Image: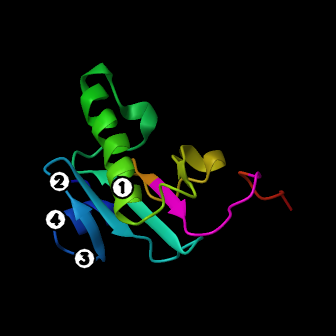
Amino acid sequence: MITDVFCKILNKELPADIVAEDDNWLAINDINPQAPVHVLIMPKKHLTDVCAATQDDAKLLGELLMAANKIAKKLGLEEKGFRLIINHGEHGGQLVPHLHIHLLGGKRLGPKIIAESK
């Protein structure tokens, strides 16, 4: 049985601040936001990461991007801009083993995508 934190949220075992939901995905506010707007968009189907997706998941992956588009517009981010991030694996900074898109905005994010290593 898969028991990552996002599966628990999807199964209503843990609470979350839901931003939007559809049949195939759920969007929640991040509990540790890195910008004024920091939404996590996750598929309801468990995929460990982006590399776990197959050709059969192409429609679902498209739905996730369209969800990001819809949510960004809903939150008023379309005009000034926003950033979408998908982390993969340890070096990519993935903390939860469940595919998800970070939607960040609400301030100037700057040109750097990563922080300098220490």
- Kindly identify the amino acid type of the residue bearing the numbered disc 2: Asp
Residue occupying image coordinates x 26% and y 35%: 60
**Which of the 4 image quarters holds residue 10?**
bottom left
Residue identified by numbered label 1: 41
Q: Earlier in the sequence, mark 3 or mark 1?
A: 3
Assess disc 3: are there few (<14), some (14-19) or many (≥20) residues with their C-alpha within 10 Å of its C-alpha.
Answer: few
State left or right for residue 56 relative to residue 11: right
The answer to whether residue 111 is magenta is yes
Mark 2 and mark 4: Cα distance apart in space: 14 Å
Mark 1 and mark 2: Cα distance apart in space: 11 Å
Kindly state the secondary structure of the residue where label 3 is placed.
Answer: loop
- Kindly identify the amino acid type of the residue bearing the numbered disc 3: Leu
Kindly state the secondary structure of the residue where label 2 is placed.
Answer: loop
- Kindly identify the amino acid type of the residue bearing the numbered disc 1: Ile
Q: Are marks 3 and 1 in contact (CB under 8 Å)?
A: no
Residue identified by numbered label 3: 14
- Per the rendering, the mark at residue 11 is 4
Kindly state the secondary structure of the residue where label 4 is placed.
Answer: loop
Q: Earlier in the sequence, mark 4 or mark 1?
A: 4
State left or right for residue 36 relative to residue 117: left
| Residue 3 makes an appearance in the image | no
